[in-house]
Structure formats: C-alpha cells, structure tokens
C-alpha cells in the first residue's frame, strides 16, 4: 500500500500511544469544532448521534493501528465508514491542513510529519469513494 519504512514503524517513531495521543487529542478537538467540516450534514449527524469522546476514541484507535501499532481499531474500514455520505476533496484537504498545523504545533519531527500525511493521503480515494463525482 505505501512504501513507508517498516522498522521502526511510524507508530514507534511518533512516540507510540502516548506520542500519538498527545497530538490527536488536540486534532480531535480542532476537527470537531471546525466550522467548514461542520457544514457537512453527515458530520453534524455524527456529532449528534455519537459525540466527541467516541469520535476522538475511534480516530485514535484507527491511527494507532494504521501507523503499525497494536490492532485496536474496532470500527469499519474507511471505504465502508464513509460510504453513505459525500466527502469533497476540499473537506479532505481541510482535515490534512488541520493535521499539519497540529503536527507542527506539537513539534512532531519533519520526517514523521511527512510520513503521516503520506499515509493519510493514501486513504483519500477510499474515504471519497461514496461521494458523487462532482463533490
Ligand atoms: C484523514 C481523513 C479521515 C480519517 C482518517 C477518518 C476516519 C474516520 C474514522 C476512524 C471513523 C469511524 C468509523 C467507525 O467507527 O466505524 C470515521 C467516521 C466518520 N467520518 Fe471520517 N475520516 C476522515 C475524513 C473524513 C471527512 C473529510 C469527513 C467529512 C467531511 C468525514 C466524516 C465522517 C463521518 C460523518 C463519520 C461517521 C460515520 C458514521 O458512523 O455514521 N471523515 N472517520
């Protein structure tokens, strides 16, 4: 899928669970409060039906697993999870821009920053797969 170095894993290079939790806690809040993303009705539904703690937990578990950490993510794969909504390229960019801002703010080194953005870029097609071509 990607040609990221396997040893040590990105999970390890990001500081493991505690390193990832440090920046994801902040990212989760920024995404949850993002006025651009919150215009998407599917995102509003997520807020109303599932709430912030569950949103942050699933994102955290997903990232731990996808960066090469323990298999702790209990949710659906990205294509299935985003199948019944429209996610635009612009909205996807907004998530990556927020991530980049948080990574620099938290002092995550340049190589790990780059590798994480590359990893997430690899999920763009799956996450956008359920969207109309014009979205
Ligand atoms: C880097 C990009 C993204 C990642 C890593 C990501 C990750 C996730 C994860 C882990 C879940 C939980 C799935 C489950 O519990 O089964 C989820 C659900 C969701 N995501 Fe994303 N997501 C991304 C981008 C987006 C974008 C751009 C939007 C919309 C603007 C979006 C909207 C949603 C919604 C509405 C749900 C709730 C689905 C439901 O259970 O009803 N996501 N996402």
Image: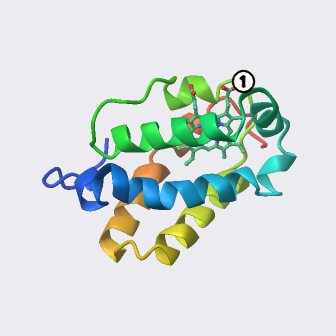
Q: Is residue 3 visible?
A: no
* Farthest residue, direction left: 7
**In the displayed structure, does residue 86 sit left or right of residue 68?**
right
**In the displayed structure, does residue 108 sit left or right of residue 55?**
left
Residue 27 horizontal/vertical position (percent): 58, 58
Residue 84 horizontal/vertical position (percent): 72, 24
**Quadrant of the drawing holding the N terminus:** top left
106 versus 54 height, above or below: below
> Is the CB of mark 1 within 8 Å of ligand 1?
yes
Q: Is residue 15 visible?
A: yes
Residue in the foreground of this view, choosing between 8 and 27: 27
Taking the image in four quarters, ligand 1 sits in the one at top right
Q: Secondary structure at mark 1?
A: loop
**In the displayed structure, does residue 5 sit left or right of residue 91?**
left
6 versus 53 height, above or below: below
Residue located 55% across and 28% down the image: 79
Which residue in the structure is indicated by mark 1?
Answer: 84
Tag count: 1
Mark 1 Cα-neighbour bin, 10 Å: few <14, some 14–19, many ≥20: few
Residue 104 horizontal/vertical position (percent): 48, 76
Residue 45 horizontal/vertical position (percent): 81, 31
Residue in the foreground of this view, choosing between 36 and 135: 36
């Amino acid at each position: 899928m990607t040609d990221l170095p396997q040893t040590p894993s990105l999970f390890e290079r990001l500081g493991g669970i505690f390193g990832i939790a440090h920046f994801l806690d902040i990212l989760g809040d920024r995404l949850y409060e993002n006025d651009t993303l919150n215009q998407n009705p599917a995102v509003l539904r997520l807020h109303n039906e599932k709430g912030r703690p569950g949103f942050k937990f699933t994102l955290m578990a997903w990232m731990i697993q996808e960066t090469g950490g323990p298999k702790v993510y209990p949710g659906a794969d990205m294509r299935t999870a985003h199948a019944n909504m429209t996610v635009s390229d612009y909205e996807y960019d907004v998530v990556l821009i927020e991530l980049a801002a948080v990574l620099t703010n938290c002092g995550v080194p340049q190589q790990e920053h780059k590798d994480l953005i590359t990893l997430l870029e690899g999920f763009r097609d799956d996450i956008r797969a359920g969207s109309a071509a014009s979205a």
